[in-house]
Image (cartoon, rainbow, N blue to C red):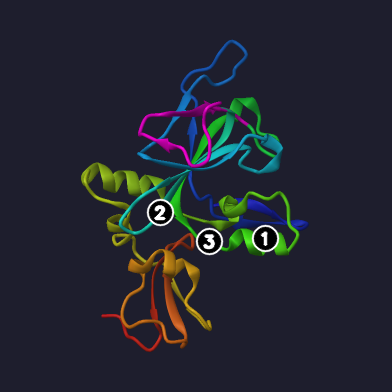
């Protein structure tokens, strides 16, 4: 949890990722750490303009998983590898870029780091909604507001103990922090894209219960009339 600006005041907000410090620097104090893909996947999005996002220059990779597409995000890069393009396949260990301090707001070079996230993409129609609001900058479906980040350290620890485990298996170990009752005329796109996170009878238009992790990642959903054992 960290503080964030809310108009003229401050409020708490979740930091959906981990910040990884530099291990080596050049004579000017700039990090020389190479940033590499954590797993096989495909490039979903590349932003090479630092001022267009609080993430600065960033890359989003998509990884196939039994739960559906899982994203990993690598932010505040000094540079993105020139050859990297959306739709390109990558292998674990492929270079993505160089650690840096880019962002739409200044990050001191002394605090240069990699912001790393792993999680699920909220809505496939996010870009359509965002453009309809005439909001900018436009990062399509790969805007930070459309990401539900999990606890990276929690997943890495789980994976260390279970090397063959997938992300869906990890989500099943995350305890819900709270539940919300939602009234909707149709099943949210999230559960169409991640159908294994819906449990019990099919959605019928009645209120639903969504169980969430402590930072708001929806872990599962069900009809409100269905009591979970």
Label 1 vs label 3: CA separation?
Answer: 11 Å
Name the dominant secondary structure of the magenta segment.
loop
- Up-down relation of residue 100 to residue 166 (above or below): above
Q: How crowded is mark 1: few (under 14 residues within 10 Å), some or many (20 or more)?
A: some
- Identify the secondary structure beneath mark 2: loop
Residue at 50 percent of width and 80 percent of height:
186
Q: In which quarter of the image is the C terminus?
A: bottom left
Residue at 59 percent of width and 19 percent of height:
30
Q: Name the residue under label 2.
A: 69
Question: Mark 1–mark 2 contact, CB under 8 Å?
Answer: no
Find residue 98 and report its horizontal and vertical position in percent. Answer: 53, 25
Find residue 6 and report its horizontal and vertical position in percent. Answer: 71, 58
Label 2 vs label 3: CA separation?
Answer: 11 Å
Question: Mark 2–mark 3 contact, CB under 8 Å?
Answer: no
Q: Name the residue under label 1.
A: 130
For marks 1 and 3 on the same chain, the one whose residue lies earlier in the sequence: 3
Find residue 60 and report its horizontal and vertical position in percent. Answer: 50, 43
For marks 1 and 2 on the same chain, the one whose residue lies earlier in the sequence: 2
Asked whether residue 105 is in view, the answer is: no
- Up-down relation of residue 152 to residue 111 (above or below): below
Find residue 182 and report its horizontal and vertical position in percent. Answer: 51, 80
Which quadrant holds residue 132?
Answer: bottom right
Q: Name the residue under label 3.
A: 124
Question: Mark 1–mark 3 contact, CB under 8 Å?
Answer: no
Does residue 90 belong to the magenta stretch?
A: yes
Residue at 46 percent of width and 22 percent of height:
23
Which region is colored magenta?
Answer: 80-101
Q: How crowded is mark 3: few (under 14 residues within 10 Å), some or many (20 or more)?
A: some
Residue 157's tag is none
């Amino acid at each position: 949890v960290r503080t964030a600006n809310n108009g003229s005041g401050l409020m708490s907000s979740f930091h959906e990722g981990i910040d990884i410090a530099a291990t080596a620097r050049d004579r000017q104090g700039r990090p020389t750490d190479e940033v590499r893909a954590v797993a096989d996947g495909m490039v979903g999005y590349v932003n090479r303009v630092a001022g267009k996002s609080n993430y600065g220059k960033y890359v989003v990779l998509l990884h196939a998983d039994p739960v559906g597409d899982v994203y990993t995000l690598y932010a505040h890069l000094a540079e993105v590898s020139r050859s990297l393009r959306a739709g390109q396949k990558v292998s674990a260990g492929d270079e993505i870029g160089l650690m840096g301090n880019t962002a739409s707001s200044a990050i001191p070079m002394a605090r240069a780091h990699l912001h790393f996230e792993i999680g699920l993409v909220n809505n496939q129609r996010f870009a359509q909604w965002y453009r309809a609001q005439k909001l900018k900058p436009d990062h399509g479906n790969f805007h930070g507001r459309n990401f539900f980040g999990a606890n990276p350290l929690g997943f890495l620890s789980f994976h260390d103990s279970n090397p063959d485990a997938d992300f869906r298996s990890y989500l099943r170990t995350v305890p819900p922090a709270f539940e919300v009752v939602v009234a909707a005329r149709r099943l949210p796109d999230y559960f169409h894209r991640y159908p294994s996170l819906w449990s019990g009878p099919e959605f019928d238009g009645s209120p639903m219960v969504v169980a969430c992790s402590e930072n708001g990642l929806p872990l599962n959903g069900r009809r409100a009339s269905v009591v979970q054992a």
